Amino acid sequence: MRKNLIDHLSQYADYHRDPRNIRTHFVGVPMIMLAVTVLLSRPAWTVGGLPLSLALLAALASCLFYFRLDTRYGATMALVLAAMLAVGQWLAGQATALWLGAGMGLFVVGWVIQFVGHHYEGRKPAFVDDLVGLLIGPLFVAAELGFTLGLRKEVRQQIEARSGPVRLRPQPAVAGV
């Protein structure tokens, strides 16, 4: 059975109910996305005046996946990926040290931020159990940003009906306090 938007976002949300974890994802996930885009932007071949790279192919495949789930989120993710492709292509045209340093630096720092968030959550990242979580993570961040802005309330309600509301993870009691 093919999963729909709510299936994917709810499964991902199961690993992300602590607001501190979600906040770290607002920073870490875009950093990782940009890092991967930067690193996959080299080498690039010019075909009909358009730079063709693994970054472009990965972005197109990702956009097809997102559009299949939801047209509005697909369009949002296409815009985000287009901006990242522009930055990635620019960095790929710079000196190797700058290109590689930016890509690797963003990647490492982004993952450190992610693991701090999952420390708050008390759960491993979703992709550990399902690699599709690597594609759903950016979509989840876009959805959560929209929810914060009051958008797509029906999507939020369906996710919370399955995964529960966003809440602080209860901290263990400290002995003697």
Image: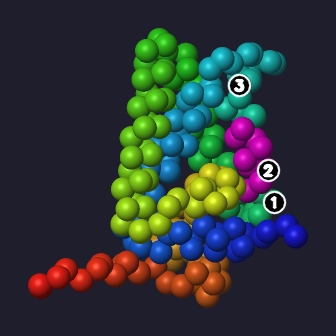
Q: CA distance from mark 2 to mark 1?
A: 6 Å
What residue type is disc 2 on?
Leu
Residue 28 located within the stretch drawn in magenta: no
* Residue situated furthest front in the rendering: 175
Left or right, 17 with reference to 12:
left
Q: Which mark, by number, is residue 68? A: 1
Q: Which mark, by number, is residue 157? A: none
Q: Which mark, by number, is residue 64? A: 2
What x and y, as percent, mark residue 96? 49, 13
Q: Are marks 2 and 1 in contact (CB under 8 Å)?
A: yes
Q: CA distance from mark 2 to mark 3?
A: 17 Å
Tell me if residue 139 can be seen. no
Tell me if residue 34 can be seen. yes
Task: From the image, tell me which residue sits under label 3.
Answer: 53
Which quadrant is home to the N terminus?
Answer: bottom right
> For residue 10, what is the image quadrant?
bottom right
* Residue situated furthest right in the rendering: 1
The residue sitting at 55% across, 30% down in the picture is: 38
Which quadrant is home to the C terminus?
Answer: bottom left
Q: SS class of the residue under badge 2?
A: helix
Instruction: Report crowding for label 1: few under 14, some 14 to 19, many 20 or more residues within 10 A (C-alpha).
Output: few
What x and y, as percent, mark residue 67? 77, 57
What residue type is disc 1 on?
Arg
The residue sitting at 57% across, 74% down in the picture is: 14
Q: Is residue 120 above or below residue 163?
A: above
The residue sitting at 78% across, 70% down in the picture is: 4
> For residue 119, what is the image quadrant?
bottom left
Q: Which residues are magenta?
A: 58-66
Mark 2 vs 3, N-terminal side? 3
